[in-house]
Amino acid sequence: MIKKLKNKKNPVTDTRGGLDAKLFAYCAMAAGGALAAAPSADAAIAYSGLKNLTLADNNTMQLDLDNNGTADFTLINLLGETTVKPGIVTYTTSRGGTYTQKFTASFVRRKTAKNFASLADNPLNALAAAGANAQLRLGKGAVIPGQGIGWMVGAAADLSFSTLTFTHGKVKRTLDTGATAVITSTFATDKSSGGTFLGKQGYLGVKFQIDNATHYGWIRYQGDTTPNTTDNATSLKATVIDWAYEKLPDTPIAVGQQIANCVTLSPARISKIISIFEPLKTIIIKGDATTTLTKDTTIDWGTGGVLTLFKVPLGKSTLLAVVRVKPSLIKKGDTYEVTVDDCAANLTVGF
């Protein structure tokens, strides 16, 4: 079970006496004196990782952005068909069943495919709408909340749609013999498609509630390409690629801002046992080739039970962190998401 806890900022008090002072001095010599005692800072972006979830025809997808067991947004792919004939109309949908009622018309057939987001899971959740035209598809780098950003609250928001209407009209005359003759016969086909995500990728800006506090985030969404020209309302799939949100309440986030699993911890398992022989623990953080780790690198251990005392750079992408563990605030078997600048790793409480 991965714990994602609100972090408590813990001021560092320099009480290096006894064994603490010896350890500090030893690390200072090992690092050539290049030490800096500093409190850990919050790195507050929670990133889902690549998901690539398919929203298929006649399907519903519920997104639990903060993984707390409650859906924050619902995406719906609705494929419906209406057939109108003289005297009766039948409307069939994948979610609502089939309905019939009396209707006077020659012949009309309408097929509709629509992807939309339902905001009914929580009345305080909302989608960002940019500009006077309430543009839902946002570009990377837009700030939420920010200038020109409004909110769509309490209603369903169309992301893409496609309709095909085929009409066959007849004018009839009853002959003296009682037979019916067709005087004219007309055919008409009307196709329409649209929505800001039709055949395009972009971001949905969101705000939602965690523990009665407002958090901001984004969802990367890929709309289906324009359906075929023969019947442009038979399929309109979509893909949810990934998402991220700001773990700190009421804190803006840039669209596309995320963290990645680009560091490893050694050891990746720690003990909650403290003794006079090991009052402090050392953890080596190693990044990939694109990572630069310095004494100013921010580390968020995902729990108030691990406190950074100081950091020692061991190379361009390697950092030694000296930490103090608070046993009462961690639990054996739990795993915490650690963020190091814009990277992430997991730390497990073992023996």
Image (spheres, rainbow, N blue to C red):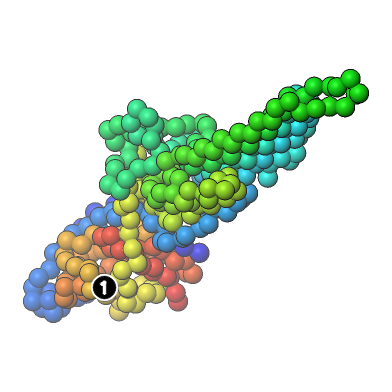
Q: Quadrant of residue 277?
A: bottom left
Looking at this view, is 18 or 257 the one in front? 257
Does residue 330 sit above or below 121 in this rendering? below
**Where in the figure is residue 176, as x and y percent of width and height?**
89, 20
**Where in the figure is residue 172, as x and y percent of width and height?**
77, 24
**Where in the figure is residue 180, as x and y percent of width and height?**
84, 27
The quarter of the rendered structure image containing the C terminus is bottom left
Q: Is residue 60 visible?
A: no
Q: Secondary structure at mark 1?
A: loop
**Where in the figure is residue 179, as x and y percent of width and height?**
88, 27
Q: Residue furthest top?
A: 176
Does residue 321 sit above or below 149 in this rendering? below
Q: Amino acid at mark 1?
A: Asp
Q: Residues within 10 Å of mark 1 (few under 14, many from 20)?
A: some
State the residue position of label 1: 288
Looking at this view, is 59 or 34 the one in front? 59
Q: Quadrant of residue 258?
A: bottom left
The residue positioned 26% from the left and 72% from the top of the image is 287
The residue positioned 43% from the left and 38% from the top of the image is 127
Looking at this view, is 39 or 58 the one in front? 58
The residue positioned 48% from the left and 48% from the top of the image is 226
Q: Residue furthest right?
A: 177
User: In the figure, is residue 60 to the left or right of 223?
Assistant: right
The residue positioned 70% from the left and 27% from the top of the image is 184
Q: Is residue 166 visible?
A: yes
Please tell me how many numbered marks the rendered image carries.
1
